[in-house]
Image (spheres, grey):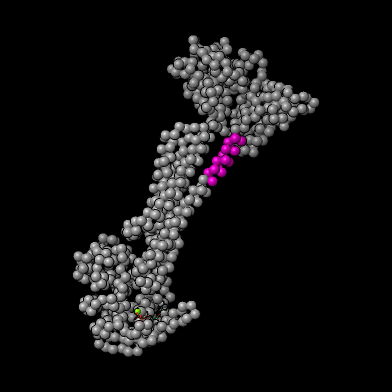
């Protein structure tokens, strides 16, 4: 599903050059659920951004679902993101003035699905998350766990091939974190959606099939859980 | 491109930012309101002055005889120039391009009676063409014709005011009746309307010039020659007038530069000056109006800029979820167009409403009447608004499209 080889990334700010990724090789099969660990600043988010076509890599090869990702224009990148990828963030990133249902429906808006239809689909996904009675609420009326479940519903609604989650439980307490992981593992099993989850917590990483460790821009360890 | 969905998307953001939207819209509404009021007032001014030009063809030239004021070829000043039929024929043959020509006598304000009714009216002996030169409108019967001229018939065309004064308003009464002009009976063959506003134009009676010469003068004298210049350009019209002047100067031996020997009224020149003046005024108004609107656009653009900055995160989320740069540009531009268009429309309606109120309740004066904003202005303003909205939204939209999702989402 994902195949990257020898990926390099350098950030240039003014006169400073920061070589963040120093040749990453990784192969993720369809339906795999992988966790990424590493110290703060080791390049986990950078890797996830490249995989999410939110950022470009400098060297190396990235193939997503058989498509070579290189020098794409923004339009094409946006379409690939919409079609193949779902995102879950630590800070949820919900649109503050849209209610839960509208937030979940947003990816379908960019697929030109009619309003009625996409809201109906969004309701189905909210129901699966056990949040149907919260559909009309704005994000600031919801708890962290509820917000993250809405973000997961939004990531799922366009039926992506891969879900990229950057510290999805980073802002949640341990009970809620386990609940969110329950949902993610359930989706991975039932829908066979490939998942990459960045985390700092061992008990989260333990729940994935495989954990890779990034140290100083390189993959230094791969553990089968 | 203009999907209902996007409008709903825009509507929902506008609804959540009511104050911002109102402030933005207000400056645009004000700009359009001012433009409409200014243009309407300009039109009012123009209509007022135009009224003064009514009652006579816009391309008419009137030449009346006068008294010399310049010595010429050994002849002294103070000589009275007297036109005759000969001059009328000379001019008719020498100038090219006129479409109507007429000679006239100045009989002046004379006593006219019908049975026991009488009054002073301006009797004006002329050729049939004078009806065209003066642009009168025949209401009943006819104006003078060539047979009247040839046979020196005692017929008269009377103004509607003459009719109402002599015949006490019943229009059928006047036709075919004999009125008495300086003791001579003339048959009324037509009633006309004159659009001039002078008393002497309203209370006028036309009779064949040949009849007047025979009955009242016993000679072939005339006082005025007038003609219209047809489709001539201003330069050609000037040339025609020059030619007429030369012809008269030669036949009466006066200096062609003598300002008093003949008296010339050139309406087309007046109209030309008037048009130039009002073109200037209109340009001035548009410049001020557009200036005001530009201030409005800059306001909208600024507020949209701030709004884009506030919405950085939202736009980042949209892009992450699959929004293309084009769709972001359209989102921002359409919001700007919607706000400008809607607010501008309110300004337009208020402006037109105020003008209507003014023209309904203010009596027309010599310099101001019917301040109107016509359809063309409204259409122009609408097009202007859409362009203005587009411009106002363009830079904020480009800024929004350039937002990078990873940076937008990192901001807390
Ligand atoms: N846009 C950028 N410009 C410059 N430097 C950047 C940029 N993004 C990240 N960096 C730097 O690259 C390095 C790797 O950052 P990254 O966010 O990938 O780390 P991370 O492993 O996700 O850390 P954390 O666990 O704290 O989230 C850091 O030193 C960071 O400061
Ligand atoms: Mg990170």
Report whether B35 appears left or right of B56: left
Q: Quadrant of residue A145?
A: bottom left
B200 or B307: nearer the eye? Answer: B307
Residue drawn at point x = 37 percent, y = 54 percent: B22
Report whether A108 appears left or right of B52: left
Q: Is residue B278 magenta?
A: yes
How many labels sit on residues? 0
Whole-percent x and y of residue B48?
51, 34
Report whether B85 appears left or right of B394: right
Whole-percent x and y of residue B24?
40, 55
Residue drawn at point x = 40 percent, y = 53 percent: B25
Q: Which residues are magenta?
A: B268-284
Can residue B87 be seen by looking at this rendering? no
* B246 shown above or below B407: above
* Screen quadrant of the N terminus of chain A: bottom left
Can residue B394 be seen by looking at this rendering? yes
Q: Quadrant of residue B205?
A: top right
Q: Quadrant of residue B123?
A: top right
A135 or B216: nearer the eye? Answer: A135
Whole-percent x and y of residue A184?
24, 77
Residue drawn at point x = 57 percent, y = 16 percent: B110
Residue drawn at point x = 41 percent, y = 49 percent: B29
* B339 shown above or below A53: above
Q: Is residue A19 magenta?
A: no
Whole-percent x and y of residue B128?
57, 23
Figure quarter occupied by ligand 2: bottom left
* B131 shown above or below B347: above
* Screen quadrant of the C terminus of chain A: bottom left
* A203 shown above or below B57: below
Q: Main secondary structure of the magenta part?
A: helix
């Amino acid at each position: 599903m994902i195949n990257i080889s020898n990926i390099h990334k350098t950030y240039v700010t003014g006169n400073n050059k920061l070589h963040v990724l120093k040749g990453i090789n990784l192969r993720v099969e369809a339906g795999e659920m992988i966790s990424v660990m590493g110290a703060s600043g080791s390049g986990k988010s950078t890797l996830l951004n490249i995989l999410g076509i939110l950022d470009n890599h400098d060297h190396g090869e990235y193939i997503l679902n058989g498509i070579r990702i290189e020098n794409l224009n923004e339009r094409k990148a946006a379409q690939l993101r919409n079609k193949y990828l779902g995102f879950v963030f630590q800070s949820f990133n919900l649109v503050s003035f849209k209610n839960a249902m509208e937030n979940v429906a947003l990816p379908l808006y960019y697929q030109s699905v009619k309003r009625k239809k996409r809201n109906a689909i969004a309701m189905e996904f909210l129901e699966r998350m056990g949040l149907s009675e919260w559909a009309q609420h704005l994000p600031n009326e919801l708890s962290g766990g509820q917000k993250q479940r809405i973000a997961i519903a939004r990531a799922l609604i366009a039926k992506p091939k891969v879900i990229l989650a950057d510290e999805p439980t980073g802002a949640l307490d341990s009970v809620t974190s386990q609940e969110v992981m329950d949902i993610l593992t359930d989706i991975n099993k039932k829908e066979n959606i490939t998942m990459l989850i960045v985390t700092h917590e061992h008990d989260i990483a333990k729940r994935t099939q495989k954990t890779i460790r990034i140290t100083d821009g390189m993959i230094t360890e791969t553990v089968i859980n | 491109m203009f999907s209902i969905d996007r409008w709903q998307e825009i509507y929902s953001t506008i609804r959540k930012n009511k104050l911002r939207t109102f402030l933005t819209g207000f400056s645009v509404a004000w700009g359009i309101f001012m433009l409409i009021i200014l243009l309407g007032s300009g039109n009012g001014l123009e209509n007022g002055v135009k009224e003064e030009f009514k009652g006579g063809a816009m391309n008419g030239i009137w030449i009346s005889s006068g008294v010399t004021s310049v010595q010429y070829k050994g002849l002294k000043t103070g000589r009275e120039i007297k036109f005759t039929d000969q001059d009328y024929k000379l001019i008719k043959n020498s100038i090219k391009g006129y479409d109507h020509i007429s000679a006239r006598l100045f009989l002046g304000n004379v006593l006219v009676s019908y049975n026991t009714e009488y009054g002073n009216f301006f009797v004006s002996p002329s050729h049939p063409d004078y009806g065209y030169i003066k642009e009168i409108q025949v209401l009943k019967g006819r104006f003078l014709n060539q047979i009247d001229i040839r046979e020196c018939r005692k017929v008269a065309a009377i103004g509607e005011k003459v009719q109402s004064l002599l015949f006490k308003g019943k229009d059928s009464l006047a036709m075919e009746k004999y009125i008495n002009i300086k003791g001579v009976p003339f048959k009324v063959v037509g009633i006309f309307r004159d659009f001039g506003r002078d008393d002497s134009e309203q209370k006028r009676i036309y009779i064949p010039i040949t009849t007047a010469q025979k009955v009242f003068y016993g000679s072939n004298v005339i006082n005025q020659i007038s003609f219209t210049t047809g489709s001539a350009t201003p330069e050609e019209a000037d040339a025609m007038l020059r030619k007429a002047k030369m012809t008269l100067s030669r036949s009466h031996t006066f200096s062609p530069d003598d300002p008093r020997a003949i008296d010339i009224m050139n309406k087309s020149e007046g109209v030309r000056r008037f048009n130039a003046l009002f073109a200037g005024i209109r340009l001035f108004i548009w410049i001020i109006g557009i200036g005001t609107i530009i201030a409005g656009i800059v306001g909208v653009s600024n507020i949209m800029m701030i709004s884009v900055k506030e919405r950085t995160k939202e736009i980042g989320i949209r892009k992450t979820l699959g929004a293309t740069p084009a769709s972001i540009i359209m989102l921002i531009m359409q919001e700007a167009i919607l706000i400008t268009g809607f607010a501008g429309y309110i300004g337009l309606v208020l402006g037109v409403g105020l003008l209507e109120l003014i023209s309904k309740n203010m009596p027309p004066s010599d310099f101001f009447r019917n301040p109107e904003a016509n359809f063309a202005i409204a259409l122009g303003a609408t097009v202007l608004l859409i362009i203005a909205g587009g411009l106002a939204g363009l830079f904020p939209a480009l800024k929004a499209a350039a937002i990078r999702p990873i940076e937008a989402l990192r901001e807390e």
